[in-house]
Amino acid sequence: MKHRMTQNDLLRRLPRERLSLLRELGDLADEGGVSLYLVGGVVRDLLLKRENWDLDLTVEGDGIAFARLVADRYGAGLAVFERFATARLVFPDGLKIDIATTRRESYAQPAILPTVQLASIEEDLYRRDFTINAMAIQLNAAQFGRLRDVYGGQRDLRARTIRVLHVGSFEDDPTRIFRAIRFEHRFGFRLERATLRLLAQAASTNLIVRLSGPRLQNEILLLFSEHDPVRAIARLAQLKLLRFLHRRLCYTKNVKRVVTAVPKALTWWARRFPDSVIDRPIVYLMALSSESSPDVVAAMIRRLALSREQAKNVSAGGSRIDRALKRLTDKGTVRPSQVYRLLADLSDEALVLLLAKQISRQHGVRLSLLKRHLLSYVKNRAVKTALMGRDLQAMGLKPGPQYRTILGQLLDARIDGMITTEAEERAFVQKRLV
Ligand code: ATP
């Protein structure tokens, strides 16, 4: 009895309205004659007392039929993925819940998505990546709150270890190699000894080569989206996993310094420019490839099947930034308009990398100088000329390439504070007319 109480307490860690929804869904599962479980990461996080509102449910029986029942009862939107026997519900208040069907997976070939066969909850938990992610909490009324921990998930949480469920796990699905590193660093856990050996073994083969670009990208960017991925990146290097991004991608001392400086650069940037939304994982990828040749970077972009926007950022990580950085931290003054020209076609991600590079050089005076340049540059991005092309035309200037030149000069003069009014702009143009 005491035991049941403890397990019930686990679900009480959820916000009250989530808890009552789960109770209702448990009752609905009873009505539908199926067993219903909360599974995976949310169970782990309840035990760890970490917030996680991703409610993943699994039905022992027909998950899609159950999802339909819930959708009808709550007026929720429903998307069904027959092939995976899963469904996604979107409740009227916006809450999303994924409902799966307990299944076993057989891997026709390693590293390829598995085929699905229905199975019991124990078998379903067995196909999961790590023991800490292989627990379920039953939701049916009579068993409400009962924790199913068949493979030692609680033991491993207590021991702070990541452990696979069977020796073929990484071969079945090499994305688990990256997931293991992700959880290891997120929770400050260690890979259990045999698991580390299996992981190193799988990493030393070419299994990861078989992962598709989007799947590899997903794992890498998820890993780099973690709160502080610096040590996880060092771990990738230590386990010789970076070669799967490109065989010539090197984690040199310099690269390490730049990667290590990224969190500081991100913090400074976020504090100064809270409205700028930074693609953080991409900044880490840029830092990681910041010393690689354009060929290597281009091949890495292809391997990871990056989007056009991400690709543009990552390929800007190299010499373009170094040139701007050199000029901005050199002795000798740089006018605000020159700063503007040097930085104008760099994305905010590239600017963060630029800052990280300077931080990594540990040169305090030049770092302060660069920060001042960045502050003035971002402020000056809002500066506009009062005159436009049609004004120049009205003033009798023939349309042509000189428009760009003159408007550029006007903008520079504005940024440098030489011109502050429209009248001054007109006078400036007038001078060029005669
Ligand atoms: P996060 O907090 O990062 O979302 P999560 O554990 O919830 O972590 P998801 O990727 O949302 O991770 O996966 C949900 C659950 O599905 C996992 O807890 C695990 O049980 C299972 N799972 C996910 N990916 C795999 C995989 N590659 N192999 C086996 N099981 C997996």
Image (cartoon, rainbow, N blue to C red):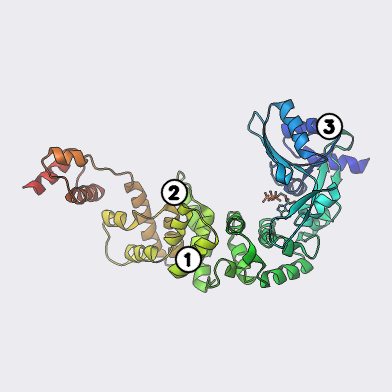
Residue that label 1 marks: 297
* Numbered label attached to residue 32: 3
In what element is the residue under mark 2? helix
Along the line of sight, which residue is nearer the eye, 40 or 275? 40
Residue type at numbered disc 2: Arg
Residue 143 as seen in the image, left or right of residue 371: right
Eye-nearest disc, 1 or 2: 1
Q: Measuring from the top left, give residue 95's x and y in whole percent.
A: 66, 34
Residue that label 2 marks: 272
Query: Any atom of ligand 1 within 8 Å of the CB at mark 1?
Result: no
Gap in angstroms between the C-alphas marked 3 and 1: 54 Å
* Numbered label attached to residue 337: none
Labels 1 and 2: the sequence-earlier one:
2
Q: Measuring from the top left, give residue 130's x and y in whole percent.
A: 76, 57
Gap in angstroms between the C-alphas marked 2 and 3: 54 Å
**Quick one: quadrant of the N terminus?**
top right
Q: Could you classify mark 1 by the number of other residues whose Cα lies within 10 Å: few (under 14), some (14-19), or many (20 or more)?
A: many
Q: Measuring from the top left, give residue 269's x and y in whole percent.
A: 46, 52
